[in-house]
């Protein structure tokens, strides 16, 4: 099967490409960093993006969204990756909207999904804990039954776009041991709930991540997403979307680094000719181009599998994330090398691509993890 975009998807992708190229060049990331922006992104820019409908891509129409799928979301995320756009589309859509759509009751959907769709509310998932590596179900955070509901105690690390979030979907253990898959319950926690403490965690790629500490946080039964002790399935679905969304973003990252490198090769001269005319550099560019196209096929195939609920979806997602991790890191490192000495300095933007690629590779499972996961899912 040929995985290609249809006319509507191409229009969405072209609109996103035109907007981010004009409004969100890579140099903007430097401005946000040097300007001391605590969030790492612009809430005003996020509202402009919301006006285009992007935060509502995967939210059903009845809640103010577009009711589309992963293929459409990946079109926008790829352009975000191309220009290293820092706004929280990945977290809001995959880690916020997806678990709310699949696990929340109608009252909570009505309360939060329209705000997510119009960009006025920001929600993300707080699931990762120290020492858990890539196991999302290693959960030490506890939820104890109280007289009027539940009391949550624990700590979540590297919460994507946790700084400035209005709410968190928190995984907590209501039964079983720390490493059990069963016994995990998801709770929706407002960021201003007493006992919630959010601390920004600086990262090498300048992405908004936060440490979320829960001390005696009290929530009602209505805060549960899904059934008690059965939150793993909802969390797993959210991570499917987030992993594939990140792979699409990393594809754009590789394309952006490659485009910047090609431009440099065509303008930088040695011995009176552009260095792009040297055969050795041509070979390296040809290899990188091939890797990017293979990654594109893997990402599109995985998006199609997720949107159609194919039985091989998990394996496809691991293929896409493994390929995207290898390709984005290669594009960043090759870009630095082919830029020469200036590529090693903070003065040039190519370093931002390498840093984002390396951090993204280590998020939601690195290439080695997903190759192993693909092997296990394939029966090896």
Image (tube, rainbow, N blue to C red):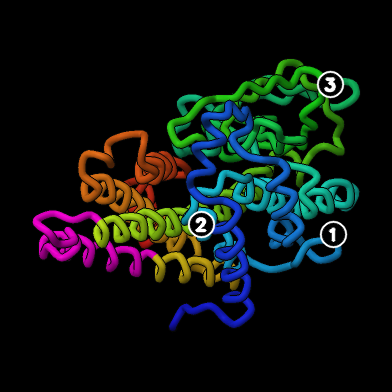
Task: Work out whether mark 1 precedes mark 3 in sequence or the reverse, and give the earlier one.
Answer: 1
Mark 2 closeness class: few <14, some 14–19, many ≥20 residues within 10 Å: many
The secondary structure that most of the magenta stretch takes on is helix
Image coords of residue 276 (percent x, y): 19, 62
In the image shown, does 111 or 73 lie closer to the viewer? Answer: 73
User: What residue is at 62 percent from the left and 70 percent from the top?
Assistant: 12
Q: Position of residue 132 (x, y in %)?
A: 47, 31
**Tag 1–tag 2 contact (CB < 8 Å):** no
Q: Is residue 45 above or below residue 308?
A: above
Q: State how far apart marks 3 and 2 are (Cα).
A: 38 Å
User: Which quadrant, please, contains the C terminus?
Assistant: bottom left
- The vertical placement of 54 against 311, above or below, is above
- On the picture, is 190 further left or further right than 136? right
Q: Which residues are magenta?
A: 268-295
Q: Earlier in the sequence, mark 1 or mark 2?
A: 1
Give the labeled residue for mark 3: 146
168 within the magenta span: no
Q: Which numbered disc covers residue 287?
A: none
Choose between 287 and 214: the one closer to the eye.
Answer: 287
Determine contact: label 3, label 2, CB under 8 Å: no
Q: Which residue is mark 1?
A: 63
Left or right of 201: which side holds 332? left
Q: Is residue 224 left or right of residue 306?
A: right
Identify which residue, 19 or 235, lies in the foreground: 19
Mark identifier at residue 244? 2
Look at the numbered disc 1 and give the secondary structure of its residue: helix
Residue 177 visible to an observer of this rendering: no
Query: Residue at 78% across / 55% down in the picture?
Result: 117
């Amino acid at each position: 099967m040929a995985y290609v975009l249809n006319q509507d998807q191409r229009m969405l992708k072209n609109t996103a490409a035109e907007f981010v190229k004009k409004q969100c060049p890579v140099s903007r990331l430097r401005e946000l960093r040097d300007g001391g922006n605590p969030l790492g992104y612009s809430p005003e820019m996020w509202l402009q993006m919301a006006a285009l409908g992007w935060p509502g891509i995967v939210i059903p129409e009845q809640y103010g969204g577009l009711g589309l799928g992963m293929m459409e979301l990946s079109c926008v995320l790829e352009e975000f990756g191309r220009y290293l756009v820092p706004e929280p589309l990945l977290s809001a859509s995959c880690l916020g909207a997806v678990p709310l759509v699949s696990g929340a009751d109608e009252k909570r959907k009505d309360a939060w999904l329209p705000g997510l769709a119009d960009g006025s509310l920001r929600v993300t998932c707080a699931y990762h804990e120290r020492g858990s590596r890539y196991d999302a179900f290693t959960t030490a955070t506890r939820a104890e039954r109280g007289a009027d509901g539940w009391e949550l105690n624990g700590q979540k690390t590297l919460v994507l776009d946790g700084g400035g979030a209005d709410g968190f979907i928190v995984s907590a253990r209501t039964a079983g041991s720390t490493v059990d898959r069963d016994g995990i319950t998801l709770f929706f926690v407002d960021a201003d709930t007493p006992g919630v403490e959010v601390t920004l965690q600086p990262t090498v790629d300048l992405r908004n991540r936060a440490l979320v500490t829960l001390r005696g946080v009290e929530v009602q039964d209505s805060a549960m997403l899904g059934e008690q002790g059965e939150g793993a399935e909802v969390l797993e679905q959210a991570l499917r979307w987030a992993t594939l969304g990140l792979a699409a973003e990393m594809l754009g990252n590789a394309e952006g680094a490659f485009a910047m490198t090609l431009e440099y090769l065509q303008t930088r001269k040695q011995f009176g000719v552009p260095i792009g005319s040297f055969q050795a550099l041509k070979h390296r560019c040809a290899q990188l181009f091939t890797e990017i196209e293979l990654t594109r096929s893997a990402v599109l195939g995985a998006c199609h599998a997720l949107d159609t609920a194919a039985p091989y979806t998990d394996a496809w997602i691991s293929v896409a994330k493994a390929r995207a991790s290898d390709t984005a890191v290669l594009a960043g490192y090759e870009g630095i090398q082919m830029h020469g000495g200036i590529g090693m300095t903070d003065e040039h933007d190519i370093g931002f691509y390498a840093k984002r690629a390396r951090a993204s590779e280590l998020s939601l499972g690195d290439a080695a993890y997903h190759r192993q996961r693909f092997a296990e899912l394939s029966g090896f």
